[in-house]
Image (cartoon, rainbow, N blue to C red):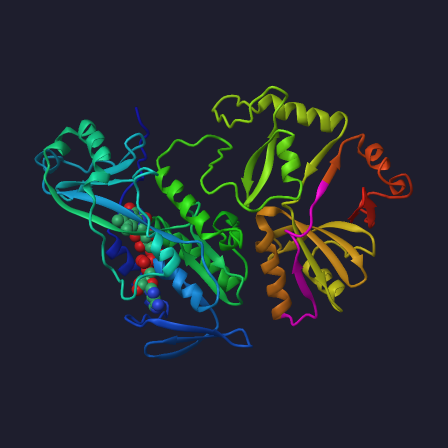
Amino acid sequence: MGLYTASDGHVDPYSLTQAIAKGARKYGALIFQGLGVTTLNLREDGRWVVSTTEGDILANRVVNAAGFWAKEIAKLAGSDLPLVPNHHQYLVTSTVPEVKALKREIPVLRHLEGSFYLRMERDGLLIGPYESTHTMRQCEDWMWNGVPEGFGKELFEPDMDRLEPHLEIAMQLVPCFADASIQSVVNGPITYTPDVLPLVGPDMLPNMWLAAGFGYGIIHGGGMGSYLASWIINGQPPFEMTECDPLRFGSWTTNDYVLAKARESYGMNNAVTYPHEERFAGRPTSRVSGAHEVLESEGACMQIHSGWEQPAWFTSPGQQPQYCPSFQRTNWHEAVEKEVDLVMTSAGIIDLTPFAKIIVQGRQAAAFMDYMTANSVPPLGRTVITHILSPTGHVYAELTVTRTHEDTFLVITGSGVELHDLRWLQDYARRGNWNVSFANITEDMGCLSVAGPKSKDILSTLSPVFNGKFPFFSCKEVTLAGVKTT
Ligand SMILES: Cc1cc2nc3c(=O)[nH]c(=O)nc-3n(C[C@H](O)[C@H](O)[C@H](O)COP(=O)(O)OP(=O)(O)OC[C@H]3O[C@@H](n4cnc5c(N)ncnc54)[C@H](O)[C@@H]3O)c2cc1C
């Protein structure tokens, strides 16, 4: 049994690239070939001096789309990217009589257990396996030492031993493949991010854009190019695609994490995934809240979110803290039901430390926040929930903004959009020459939520301030159990 996608197909990557280049030239693009970028320098006016082997180019914007060299280009600009090339192989047979005799092309076959795709290639067959997590190879030394000097479009030595388990399954499935002779084996670098999605959008550096980390650059290239061009021209993304935002990764994304996750993502390319799936390579990360040990001792089963190890659910007494995914009810179903019930009828403490926390401060901080957000700026000691809107009025971000001092705001936003939101604020401040500064204190400040009908009673036992006038959406600095709290 299988699924048939009528619109599935394949394209020759060389012709596709040429077609896109032709289209770009038609609309005025100039393409210089054989010109290597050697240095990148940011000028005070936000423009980049791009030095090449044949002179300098002054650029309003730079798009780093350098494939597996993208990490090297990022280093020229003083940053880094979470990328590693994996070895990826495919094999092409010479003419197969049964294939040649076919009157029409067979669909591209994707076999999940065998972890390969197989399709016609002229009169023969082409098979491209995704090798297992344990046997696949990565350019680990490139990760640490950079792409070897002079490495261009070279290929690696084919490794038939690694392909064999996949080929055996293919032979059972497509018997004529067993008698085919091998014409060529291609083994090349395929760039991976930890989660196999590309890095597409603005970087943190001014006017630096990214279109890199494509595991499926042929499939995704056209669409991603259009998405990026639209964002650059219109000053806002054409639709929300935070999954591919380059800033979903951060300083927590170490080389070791990238290697472990890219290996896992590649090896599980054809794995059947469960709802709310957790993957454990590269974990635990270093991104934990100050309450991490307490939470673990209370039976927390951790899940990863934006690099944070955060509790997904708590075991009941006698229950094992095991991850047992399922398409039906999971082993955490009842525990979560109990937690929800407790918070609704009594109270619960939720560790929200992964929430992003940004301090916006300065002489023009209030005017800036007023300009940037849709709701009114809160008076001192008050909080508002507000939105950053895009130029055409789409919601770009949802923020909780508290005015802690006349010229200081504590901005809290989702953990998944920490740098995504900070980048937008910083970019507008820079372009508008606003007198404001930003401090990302996400990892310096914990955040606990006490929720439920009994929350006030509980907090009142810690400080008399909760018995007094403390209306909704207001903020005070209090000391709770010896800890300074906002
Ligand atoms: C064996 C194999 C099979 C694959 N199969 C598929 C598939 O079936 N479907 C699919 O969608 N994808 C597939 N891929 C992946 C696909 O090939 C890549 O995702 C895609 O080519 C990446 O395109 P890119 O433009 O990001 O990078 P690239 O094509 O690598 O382009 C990067 C460009 O940057 C240039 N550059 C680098 N450094 C500099 C510098 N210093 N100065 C100036 N220019 C520089 C390079 O010369 C190059 O032209 C496969 C990859 C491999 C290896």
User: Residue 386 lies in magenta, yes or no?
Assistant: no
Q: Is residue 439 visible?
A: yes
Q: Measured from the top left, where is residue 23 in percent x and y?
A: 33, 62
Q: Decide which of 125, 361 is in the foreground and name it.
A: 361
Q: Quadrant of residue 320?
A: top right
Instruction: State the residue at coordinates (84%, 38%).
Output: 462
Report whether 477 appears left or right of 424.
right
Q: Decide which of 255, 68 is in the foreground and name it.
A: 255
Q: Is residue 3 above or below residue 94?
A: above
The quarter of the picture where the N terminus appears is top left
Q: Which residues are magenta?
A: 432-448
Q: Is residue 208 above or below residue 306?
A: below
Report whether 403 appears left or right of 395.
right
Q: Is residue 63 above or below residue 8?
A: below
Q: Measured from the top left, where is residue 482 in percent x and y?
A: 81, 45
Instruction: State the residue at coordinates (33%, 61%).
Output: 147
Q: Measured from the top left, where is residue 274 in percent x and y?
A: 46, 30
Q: Is residue 23 visible?
A: no
Q: Measured from the top left, where is residue 246 in percent x and y?
A: 49, 54
Report whether 248 appears left or right of 31.
right
User: Residue 438 lies in magenta, yes or no?
Assistant: yes
- How many numbered circles does the render carry? 0
